[in-house]
Image (cartoon, rainbow, N blue to C red):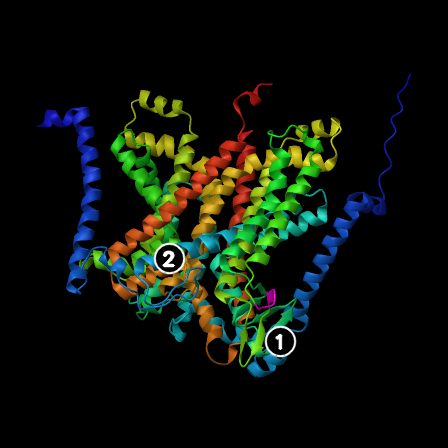
Amino acid sequence: MEMVVVAPPAPGKVEDLKRRFFATPLQALLSLMSLAIMAFVVWKLLDWAVFSAVFTTSGGPEACQAAAGACWSVIAARWRIILFGLYPFEEQWRSALACVAVVVMTVLSCIPAFWTGRRIALVWGAGTALYYVLMKGGVLGLSYVGEEAWGGLALTLFIFVTTCLIGFPLAVCLALLRRSELPWISRTTALIIDGVRSLPLISILFTFAIVLPFALPQWLVGDKLYRVILGSALFFSAYQAEIVRGGMQGVPAGQEEAAMALGMSYWQRISRILLPQAMRNALPATINQFVISFKETSLVVIVGFFEILASGNAAYGTGEWRFAYVEVYAFIAFIYFIFVFSLSRYGAFLERRMSVGER
Amino acid sequence: MVSLLRNQKVRNALLQVLYVGALAALVLAGVVIARRNLAEQGITSGFDFLYKSTGWDVNFSLLPATANDPYWWFFLIGIINTLFLGTVGLMLATLVGTIVGLARTSSNELARLLGRTYVDIFRNIPLILQVFFWYAVITHLPTPRAAHEAWGMMLTSRGLYVPIPNVGAIAFAAAILAVIAAIALPVWLGRTSRLSQPFGERLGIQLAAAATALATAAVILALGRLPDLPLLDFPALQGLNLKGGLRIPPEFSALAIAIAIYGGSYIAEIVRGGFKSVGKGQMEAALSLGLSPWRVFTLVRLPLALRAMLPILANQYVWLMKATTMGIAVGFTDFFMIVALTINHSGQTLETIGILMAGFLAINLSLAAIFNRINKAIALKGNQLRA
């Protein structure tokens, strides 16, 4: 006898909608409520940000203030302060180029082809050096600009990059020291890591910026910027060390024993066997930590740096744009959002990619 | 000598001594230099300064504070402010996070989309930016003379004014405790195994307990009432300022709102993860036993999800508690701001930094201890794993 297979009728558009959103009265209520909230918020936002907004500077602040919607002319008038801070006006192209260099460097290091220790070090070393030369000048015919004049987005990016650049190797060292077989070394390191982790970042930045000069000999004090970067790197490395250590714990003990049996030295075992595998395990959490520390660079505003948040405060805080604070904060939030959101999406992508490899 | 260095044990001991010694020497050198530098500025080290009066004031305090109070009292005020802001922030963030997290796990696609949009937006904007934003919004509200009024509350640039009952402080606190008991008692009665009634038949007892607690609250309020004043003290305009009511300063509300919104987006993800970790079979088994959807949720899904998310939630709470240090950005006198002000005014740098570290260590450790207790109470008990 022949089996007759009857395919269920393909649902029509209306039935599909009904099934997805109005299956039960409760579902229908939920759908309608969500729809109402969404429609309200989207409409209000669009109206404020686009339809009733003022985009040109021609009317000046007064016309802008009178408008019902957003006053984007404050951005048009003050974007240079927000992005570049107090950097000399004619030289701001250097600051912009430096930002581009950092972004290119970050994008490059997201490509798997660059994931060997040497290449990633090369990319980051070259990128940071390029940034430094562009910003500071004094060579190649570029005029000298001291660190105290750096500001805006460029400073935010610099602090982030140098924090990672110093913090990452430090984190690997701390993780290795913490898993040392010598009890006093591992205990002391654990104490340092846990101590730093239990303190808020602001208090560490404050200590490094304001208190540390008392505890250092004169010749070691250096610029406040570099002290703050050191503090932020220490904080980053304490968290990152735990992530790296977690990655190391995920490497089967047999791997290291096999390496030992082959007669590899400690450094060979670490650099050829343990770290590559541990890094792979720790990658998703590491990206997450990068995301967090990018957001946390904004805290340096508290110890008096002119990074993007402080320059935003200055952009609306002085003179005739005092009313336009929402627009300025929205602009800064948008910049942060682009960086952080793309980084965290990238992290999610990596996680999926790696879990596919695992199967 | 060389043969001694080749000896593994000697080498290990030497390495450890070198490492610990170098670190200790670094710290010691720092302290010695700092003491010399401070002594040059005429600052004597030691903790005597704790008993001197500060000479400056704090803008927010739950305890009475004047410029004549000693430093130790101010440190205490700072810690209480931090804990208070932290607790309010945690509760609000948990509320927001639970709602958004439930929306994210809902079976409704639109609700999921709404929750996801919320998380994506607010998680990706730094907390301090949100604090600045809300502070700017609140301080740009109209002056008291043109205040927004709603349900007896007044929204002004000087803060939010809410009506407050005219009762003594102790009676007020006791009444709040009674109200909390009115919520907590029925929940506890519904779950405890100390009662002889079966779990389903306790509604009467629960209602009676809640009613008793609420009645107690009412009696406390009536007894503690200040004489010759109306029961509720409404804020009202008097001259150029508002009189009466309770003023919630803009610094506090900005921080609480920002922590609630930002922390809520993180907690939402934790809540979602917790619910995702509950096996589908558990729910199906519960449904096939004939439990109503509500009971499936409260008796099966929620407890299992809670168990999965509590350890992560504890970390998040510790983080949020530390985030109260953002107070210094808008001038809220939390523990850290008191520390910073003390260093500015008294110059007792090393001692104050020590107090700062000890304070946060104590806060972190006690939070961790509380959560370990809770965790232990709801963790899987040994034999439950046996199938």
Pointer 2 residue: B336
Q: Main secondary structure of the magenta part?
A: loop
Q: Which residue is pictured at 26% across the width and 62% down the height?
A: B52
> Picture quarter containing residue B68?
bottom left
Residue visible at 34% across and 24% down in the picture: A259
Pointer 1 residue:
A54
Residue A108 visible, this angle: no
Give the camera-side residue of B2 and B170: B170
x and y, in percent, of residue B280 in the image: 67, 31
Which image quadrant: the N terminus of chain A?
Answer: top right
Q: Is residue A324 magenta?
A: no
Host chain of mark 1: A
Q: Amino acid at mark 2?
A: Phe
Q: Which residues are magenta?
A: B228-233
Q: Residues within 10 Å of mark 1 (few under 14, many from 20)?
A: many
Chain ID of residue with mark 2: B
